[in-house]
Image: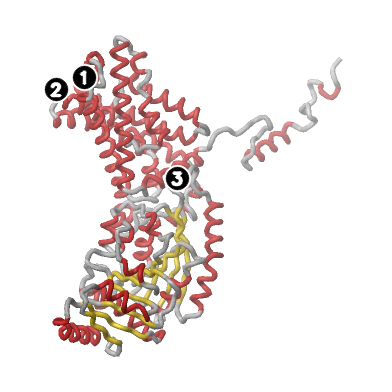
Amino acid sequence: MSDPEHRDGDARSPDGKDPAESVREAVERSRSGAPAAGRVVRDRFSTDEVFQRIIAAADEEITSGSRELFFSGLAAGFAITITFLLYASLTASTGGDTVLSVMLYPLGFIYIIIGGYQLYTENTLPPVALTLERLASIPALLRNWTLVLAGNFTGGALGALALVFGGVLDPGAATAAASLAQKGVATAWWPLFAKAAFAGLIVAGVVWVEYAARDTISRLVVIYLAFLAIPLGGLYHSVVSFTEMVYLVLLGDLAVGVGLVEFVLPVLLGNTVGGVVLVTLVNYFQTTEHRLESARFEGANRQLSSREWLLGGVVGRAYVPLVDTVEPAVQEDNGDYRVVVPIANPRTEDHLVELACTLASDHEAATVHAVHVVQTPQRMSGGYGVSQHRRIVDESKTLLEPVRATADAYDVGFEASTVVSHRSFQEIFDIARRKNADTVVLGWSEDRLWGAARSEQSLSDLTRRLPCDFLILKDRGFDTSRLLLPTNGGQNCALSAEVARTLQSVAGTEVTLLHVVDGAAERTAAEEFLADWAVEHDLGDATMTVDGSGDVEAAIERAATDSTMVVMGATERGLLSRLVADSLHMDVVDEVDCSVLLTERPNGWNLRERVFGRR
C-alpha cells in the first residue's frame, strides 16, 4: 500500500519541499558561491582563480633579478640533462622499446617544476598573462625570456659536456644518445616546428593545470603524464633538443650552425607558438572580464599605458606593483618643487619627512610626497587578493598619520600613498619619474629599501640614470643646527651646498665648509678656492676651514666633533650603486657621532633641464 504522502501524483520531494522551490534555492546558493547541494564539495579552482594564481607567480618571475633568473634557468637546463641521460640509458637497456625507454623521461621536468626552477617553455604562460593584462611591458617579457633561455641553454650545454667527457654513459647508452639526437636533426624544418608546437601546448598546459591543482600528488601525476606524452608522441622540447645538439657537436658529428638553424630554431619557435597561442591566449580569453579584480588593486586603473607597454622603462614603468595608490603628477609646467620620501617603516622614519619639509619650505610652491613602500615576501603561494590589498592600504594610512602630523607643521603641500611590490628599490625610481620629483629623500638604516633590490633593470643602469637628486640620511638624532660641509668641488658638492644654503635660510643652520689638501704648501691656494667656492654657492658667510693633513676622512671626523650633521657629496664612483651593493666603505660615516647626509645628483641633464628644471 502506497504512502499517501509519496504517491506518484504528488509533486513534492521526500523532504516535503516543492521541487521548484528546491531548484530556485539551489540556483541562489550556487550564485552565492556555495555548493548547490549539500553533498557537493567544491574541489577545484575556477578559471578566474587559476588566472589569479598564475598572475601571482608571474609577479615573482617578471621582477626577479637578472642573476636570479639566469642561475635558476641554468639549474633547469642542467636538470634537463637527467631527462636526456635516462632516455638514452633506458633506450639502450630495453632494446629501444617504445614505452619502456621513455618511462623516466619526465624526471628532469619534475625536478624543475617542483623545485621552482625557471624553464623557458613554462614562461610562455605566467609572464605572458601578465603582459596581456598590461601589468608588465613587452620589454620586460623579452628580458625574462632571454635570461631564462640563456640559463637553460648554458645548463644544457654543461650537461652535454659532462655526458660526453665525464664517462657517465656506457658505450651502449652513448650510442643510443647519439641516435636519438640524430633522429631530431634528420627531421625536416616544418615537421619539427609542428611537433614542437604540440610540445609547447603540453608544457604550458601543465603550468595551467598545476595552478589549478590543490595538492602535490595531483601536480606530480599531471607533470609525469604530460611530459611522458612528449617522447611517446615523437614531439620535441627546445632545451632537450639544444642539449642533444650540443652532444652531437661535442662528438664531432654536427656543425654548430647547422644544429642551431635546422634543429634548435624550429623547435624553439614551435614551443613558443604552442605555449603562447594554443594555451595562454585561449585560457586568457576564457576568463571573465573581472579577472583583474583579484590580480591587482583597482584593476584596470593600474595598467600600463600603451607607450609603457610597448617600450617599458624607457618611457615610464615596465611593471605595475601589486598595490599602487600613487597617482601621476599633473603634467603641467607649474614650477612646483616636489620631494618624494620613500618610507619603509613610518614609525621610525618621520625625520625623513621633517628633512624633506624643511627643504621644500624654502620654495614658494612645494609638495612633499611620502610613499610607504612595502616589500612583499619573495615567495607567495597565492598572491594578494582585493581584501588583502585594501587591508594593506588601510593599515598603511593609519601608520602614515604621525608622518602627516609632522608635515602639517610646515607650510608645504603634503601627499601620502602606498606601494606594495616585489622590487621596492626600483619602485623608488619609477615613483620619482611619475611624480616629476626634484629630490628623493631616503633613509639609511638596517631595513633600508635597497636591501631588496630586485629589478628587471640592472643596478648599474638604474643608478646611472637617476631621475632626480637623491639625499640619503643616516640619522643619529635629527638636528640641523650646526652643519659641516666638506667640499672639493663637483656637482654633488654643489648639491650639498644647495642643501646647506636651504637649511641656513629656513632653519638658521650654522654652516662650516671644509677643504682638505695635502700639505701646508697648498694652503694658500686652498683658502682661495674655498672662498671663491663659498661665494659661488651663496655661502660666503659660512665658517671656512682648510685642513692640510691630506687625510680626508680623518679631517672630516675631527671637524665634525662640534657638528650636528655632516653633508657629503657622492664620489665619482657613485653613491646609490655602492649602497645597494654594500660596497660603500666610508669609515667616517660610522665614526662621527652626528647624522650624515649623503647627496648625489644625476649625470647627463641637458642645458634646458639645468636652467629650467626637469619639467
Residue at horizontal 45%, vertical 33%? 210
Residue at horizontal 50%, vertical 28%? 217
Q: As rendered, which of 506 and 381 lies closer to the eye?
A: 506
Q: Is residue 507 left or right of residue 536?
A: right
Q: Point out residue 110 in the picture as x, y percentages from the top left corner.
A: 40, 29
Mark 3 vs 2: CB contact within 8 A:
no
Q: As rendered, which of 110 and 485 lies closer to the eye?
A: 485
At label 2, the amino acid type is Asp
Q: Point out residue 475 in the picture as x, y percentages from the top left corner.
A: 42, 70
Residue corresponding to mark 2: 253
Q: Point out residue 318 in the picture as x, y percentages from the top left corner.
A: 34, 54
Mark 1 vs 2: CB contact within 8 A:
yes
Q: Is residue 422 left or right of residue 394?
A: left
On screen, residue 6 above or below 477? above
The answer to whether any part of residue 57 appears in the image is yes
Bin the neighbour count of mark 2 within 10 Å (Cα to Cα): few under 14, some 14-19, many 20 and up.
Answer: few
Question: How much space separates mark 3 and mark 2, taking CA atoms?
Answer: 44 Å
The colour mode here is secondary structure
At label 3, the amino acid type is Arg
Question: How much space separates mark 1 and mark 3, taking CA atoms?
Answer: 40 Å
Residue at horizontal 36%, vertical 61%? 430
Residue 379: numbered disc:
3
Bin the neighbour count of mark 1 within 10 Å (Cα to Cα): few under 14, some 14-19, many 20 and up.
Answer: some
On screen, residue 255 above or below 98? below
**First-in-chain label (1 vs 3):** 1
Quarter containing the N terminus: top right
**First-in-chain label (1 vs 2):** 1
Residue corresponding to mark 1: 178
Residue 193: name its quadrant: top left
At label 1, the amino acid type is Ala
Quarter containing the C terminus: bottom left
On screen, residue 54 above or below 526? above
